[in-house]
Amino acid sequence: HLGLAPPQPPAGVASAAERGEILAGLLQPQAALSPKYFYDQRGSELFEAITRLPEYYPTRTERALLRRHGHAIAQAVGPARVVIEPGAGNCDKARELCALVRATHFVGVDISADYLRDAIARLRVALPGLHARAVGADITRGVHLPPDVPGARRLVFYPGSSIGNFDPPQALALLRHMRELALDDGGLLIGFDLPKDVAVLEAAYDDAAGVTAAFNRNALAHVNRLVGSDFVPAQWRHRAFFNPHASRIEMHLEAAGPQRVRWPGGGRDFAAGERIHTENSYKYPLPDFTALLHDAGFTRTQAWTDDRGWFAMVHAQA
Ligand code: AVI
């Protein structure tokens, strides 16, 4: 590709496509914002704080699964290979996994590019023999690997139940894309959250310390920077509840009073109590998720769950 790259907007300002997507969501009758807008630098830090909260069980349950079944997981995955992690974040889990499967190459992809670059630098220190690369990209637009990434024996690693933040048709499309990334002799190791007691689920998304509330509101501060809007985050209440019909946690921001929000070229008035839908977090029963993996083109699957049946890891062969 020899042409000149199109001029890029300065960091922290939305591209035309991003701006269109954000404003279209805010102007829908039921206003909505993609959960990807949680993850600016501060949002990534807040998410990391969430993973350490007593109420937020997914991260520590998954880590325990990886440690307890490490040997069996390494066997299912096979020997040294290239690990690709979409949405790598702080790369904590990547460090353990790369050591476990004796990976030679790691490619971390994340929308929060600066945060990822720092994480990759730490990963290189922790595992000096690993060739580790950072790719700052939005995985919903497709993961494009640098041309020099080896093609053989790939493992796509998608932990943390991030797949739950996509609607099932989008999740299927993403899994198909991962199936392609894995090539014909690779696989996918994926973690996802299982349905459970509603009180446990709701506490995990509405913690006593208010970290998840701050994480939710931070999306408005991020959007203000991206599109030049004037949301006052403190005027929006955090709402999180389980929707049993869709088997998902929903997060919303609810206007504490009437809000007049303006941005260059437009705006919207919100009545008191009106909501912006900011996130879904789907909880899949294991058989449903296995079926989704087969629909996406994976063949054999092997699953591990914790004793309480709260979280699952699946290895799916291409
Ligand atoms: C990143 N993702 C899997 C988290 C989840 O549990 O859906 C995001 C999150 N939202 C609120 N708390 C954590």
Image: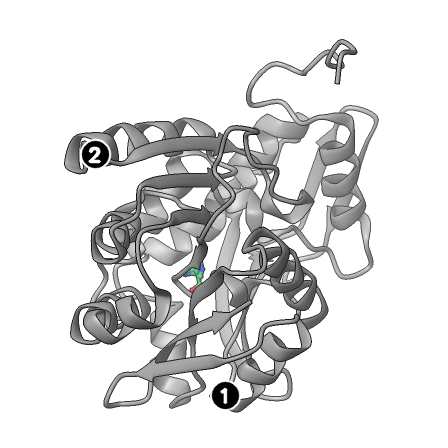
- Give the residue displayed 27% in from the left and 27% down from the top: 121
Going by the image, does 8 lie left or right of 317?
Answer: right
Which amino acid, by three-letter code, is at mark 1?
Pro
Vertical position of residue 129 compared to residue 65: above or below:
above
Q: Position of residue 149 (x, y in %)?
A: 49, 34
Residue on which disc 1 sits: 285
2 vs 1, front mark: 2
The residue at 36%/66% (across/down) is 77
Residue 225 position (above or below residue 202): above
Q: Coloured how?
A: one colour
Q: What is the three-letter code of the residue carrying label 2?
A: Gly
Measured Cα–Cα span from mark 2 to mark 1: 38 Å
The x, y position of residue 109, in whole percent, is: 48, 40
Towards the viewer: 110 or 238: 110
Q: Residue at x 70, y 38 (%)?
A: 261
Q: Secondary structure at mark 1?
A: loop
Residue carrying label 2: 129
Horizontally, residue 172 falls left or right of residue 24, namely left
Image quarter for ligand 1 equals bottom left
Please give the name of the residue rendered at 17% of the width and 75% of the height, measured from the top-left corner: 68
Q: Give SS at disc 2.
A: loop
Residue 54 appears in view: yes
